[in-house]
Each structure stands twice: as C-alpha cells, then as structure tokens.
Amino acid sequence: MEFEEQQHLKLWWLYLLVGVDAIIVLSIVLFDKGGMSFTDLKAVYFAPLWAVILPFAIIYLIQQNVLTLRINEEGIYYRYFPFKARLKHLKWDEIAKAHITKYDAFGDYGGYGVKIRLWFKFDDKAYILNDKDRGLQLEFKNGKKLLFSSNRIDEMELFLINLKTRYHIQAIQ
C-alpha cells in the first residue's frame, strides 16, 4: 500500500512575461534606426539574441525539476530532482504530527518552489509546486516543519486516514 505523486512547476504565465520582453528587445534590434546588421550583431557577440533566448531556456530548465513524494507504512520518501538526487526517507517515529493543512504560498512562504517560511523561521520549509492552497504538513519531534503541496490532496487525505487505521500510526492526525 503506497501513495506516490510527482509534481512539476507550471509557470506558463512566466513565458508570457518573457515573451513581452523578447518582443521589445527584438523590435529595438530589428527596427531601431534601420536595425542591426549581421556584422553589428557579430561585433556584440549576438548579445541581443542571447538576451531573448536565455530567459526561455532558464524557465524551461526550472520546469524540468520534479518533486517525487511517496508515502507508505514505513514513512515518507521525497526527492526534488536534480537538487536532491537521492530519495530522502522520513520515518514515522521521527514525525510528531502529519496532517493536511491550508496555506498561502505568497503570504506564508513568499512564492513557489523550495521555500523557507517568511520572517526568518528557518525551521519551517516548504515544497510548493502548484497553485493549490492545501498540503501535507509534517511537524517533527525536534520542532522543525516541512510542507508538501499536492495536486491530489483528497486522495492523499484518504490514504493517510487508511494508513492510520490499518497500521496505527500515531503521527497522522
């Protein structure tokens, strides 16, 4: 019995912002005072073209990051590839409390991605990769907290209830 989910950052709106920037840069390069010739572009090492292509490439690479979350009777496993290449295992006896909670990505953590709670609360970390407002909150016995967003939060909640009743895991609330 196991629950597994993979999440990606979906930043489609960022492509729109970078697209507007690309249109502005290309219109200046092509149409300002007759436009730049190939020799002019070569003289500046094609910098205007790099200024257009590089932001799209960076956004694409960021969207290729994958958060894998696996929950079973032994504990919780997670990996955020490529930053955490190995699967991290959190045992149930290390966790004081695990529950589904409501959060505000921008108000509590300052946005999406791997975040630390605002106002210098360094013991509260979050993996927020979607625009939902509910996630799995883990509170450890040493006082640290870890939050995972989920695209399948209702399935996860039912799975945790089933896991608690079947294996008598006290950490699940």
Image (cartoon, grey):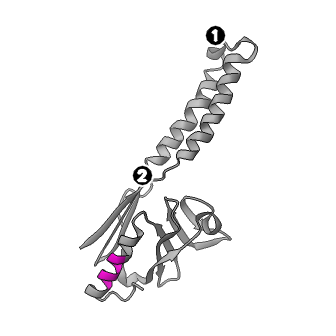
Residue type, label 2: Pro
Q: In the picture, residue 43 is in which quadrant?
A: top right
Residue 122's quadrant in the figure? bottom right
Q: Which residue type does callout 1 highlight?
A: Thr
Which structural element holds mark 1? helix
Q: Height in image: 108 above or below 73?
A: above
Q: Nearer the viewer, residue 5 or 48?
A: 5
Q: Residue at x 66, y 20 (%)?
A: 44
Residue 16: within the magenta?
no
From the image, give the main secondary structure of the stretch colored magenta: helix
**Looking at the image, which is closer to me, 46 or 24?**
24
* Of residues 131 and 7, the one drawn nearer to the viewer in this rendering: 131
Q: Which residue is mark 1?
A: 39
38 sits left or right of 63 in the view = right
Residue 42's x, y, as percent? 61, 15
| Residue pointed to by mark 2 | 82
